[in-house]
Image (cartoon, grey):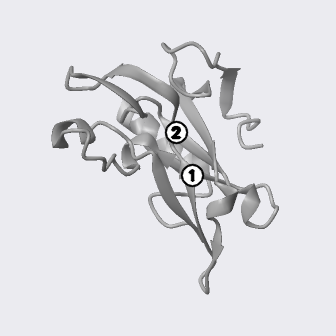
Amino acid sequence: MWFADPRIRQLERFDNHDRTRPGDFGFLYQGRAISVQVKSLQSHSIRKTSQGYIGTFQCDARDKRRVRLPNGQWVDTTCLVVGGFDLLAVNLFELEQTWRFAFARNTDLPRARSSRYTPEQRRYLLATTIRITWPLQPPISDDPFPVLETIVAEKL
């Protein structure tokens, strides 16, 4: 829906079993490689409020695996790693049965809170469950292109 845009080049779906390529798919944007992780709202979590909606989505790996953190430590976890992919896309269809998506930079997502990780490890692990609202609130956006601009600027 969003990535058929002519600014997106070489769109590629990644093999789910290839641990060397984080994310679900990737593409080139302004000549820079971008990896995208796609998640969906948990339909049972959605609540209508006076302001709109609140829901959650799982932002974790399917299974526990050994990952190397940016500080060099290894940890066994289902958490995704900060910086492990570039762009998060969350399917919001369940809100009003309308195809909408929310986008955020990986580095803007909340960190793991579990006490089974040290404070240092939590700095590098994403929360496994993340709350989202509609209307969206920063740093989450309904347009991926400003988010992509920021990601590309960081990659320069």
The spot of residue 141 in percent (x, y) is: 55, 57
Q: Position of residue 120 (x, y in %)?
A: 17, 38
Q: Position of residue 14 (x, y in %)?
A: 64, 19
Marks 2 and 1 sit apart, C-alpha to C-alpha, by 15 Å
**Depicted 118 relative to depicted 129: above or below:** above
The answer to whether 72 is drawn above or below residue 49 in the figure is above
Q: Nearer the viewer, residue 156 or 56?
A: 56
Whichever of labels 2 and 1 marks the residue nearer the N terminus, that label is 1
Dot 2: within a 10 Å radius of its alpha carbon, few (fewer than 14), some, or many (20 or more) residues? Answer: many
The one nearer the camera, 115 or 132, is 115
Name the residue located 44 percent from the left edge and 44 percent from the top edge.
150
Q: Three-letter amino acid code at disc 1?
A: Phe
Kindly give the residue lying farthest to the right in the view shown: 97
Q: In the image, is 90 to the left or to the right of 117?
A: right
The answer to whether residue 30 is visible is no
Res 83 quadrant in image: top left
